[in-house]
Image (cartoon, grey):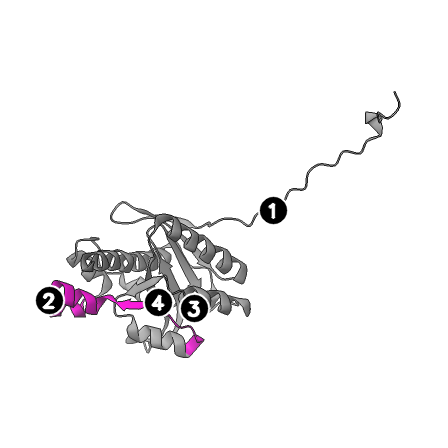
Amino acid sequence: MKGIPCIRHLSIRPPLVTQRMPRFKGIDFLMEDGNGIQTQVVSSQRALKSSLEDMLEAMHGEEDMIVGLEMEFSAKDIEGKCFVQQRIEVLTLCTGSKCVLIRLDSDLDEGWFEKLCMFLANKDIVFVGVHTKQDLVKLENEYGLRVKNFVELSELAAGVMMKPCVAGYGVRKLATELEVLELKPRPSKVCWSDWNAGKSQLSNAPIKCSTMDAYASYKIGKKLLEDEE
């Protein structure tokens, strides 16, 4: 019949399939409270962008805008007698479900700085840490990275608990004191790991330690800030 095209002459093209950026992928760690945290180690601009976007999306979905901070330093062995902290090599950010461990020592191209600056300057996010105030000064001096909305938990805990002595506690001891996590001190080998050791791939042990400390800051911050309300 006229007007009806022959099917065999039609060229049927398959629909275009757009590739989606891979979602948050990382290492799964079980925290002491039974909560699972997924940690992504970031050393490229593309991974940094997607991981921060995924973290922020999850935070909005969970209606929880608290982020725990932890920083790791390279260390120099002085004649086998002591270690001296040097440059900040790693910035760890942790929420109630995700953790991003950013290797500042890696060969990140120029675009990473803008992405991270925007995240750290987000006024809706409350960044928390224990004895982190001076580290933030060092972070700004070394990398130009500034955290806009930060709460020093050692000072807050001393005020809320009305116990001045807890201001001197480290993150793990403070978490135990507040009964949000029961944590043992870091293993000494991990305490003084050279996080920049030839820019080699990090093993799970230091990654988990940094995750646990950042998560402990998150848990402490969540408890103290909620108690203040």
Inspect the magenta stretch and tell me whether residue 78 lies in it. no
Q: What secondary structure is found at the residue carrying circle 2?
A: loop
Helix, strand or loop under label 1? loop
Which of the two marks, 4 or 3, is nearer to us in this view?
4
Q: Residues within 10 Å of mark 2 (few under 14, many from 20)?
A: few
Q: Residue at x 15, y 67 (%)?
A: 158
Residue 83 in view (yes/no): no
User: Which residues fall within the magenta stretch?
Assistant: 142-169
Residue of label 1:
19
Looking at numbered disc 4 in the image, what kind of residue is underneath it? Met
Q: Nearer the viewer, residue 99 or 20?
A: 20
Viewer can see residue 7: yes
Which mark is on residue 196?
A: 3
Identified by mark 2, the residue type is Lys
Q: Amino acid at mark 1?
A: Gln
Element carrying mark 3: loop
Q: Residue 71: which disc?
A: 4
Q: Position of residue 155 (x, y in %)?
A: 20, 69
Precedes in sequence: disc 1 or disc 3: 1
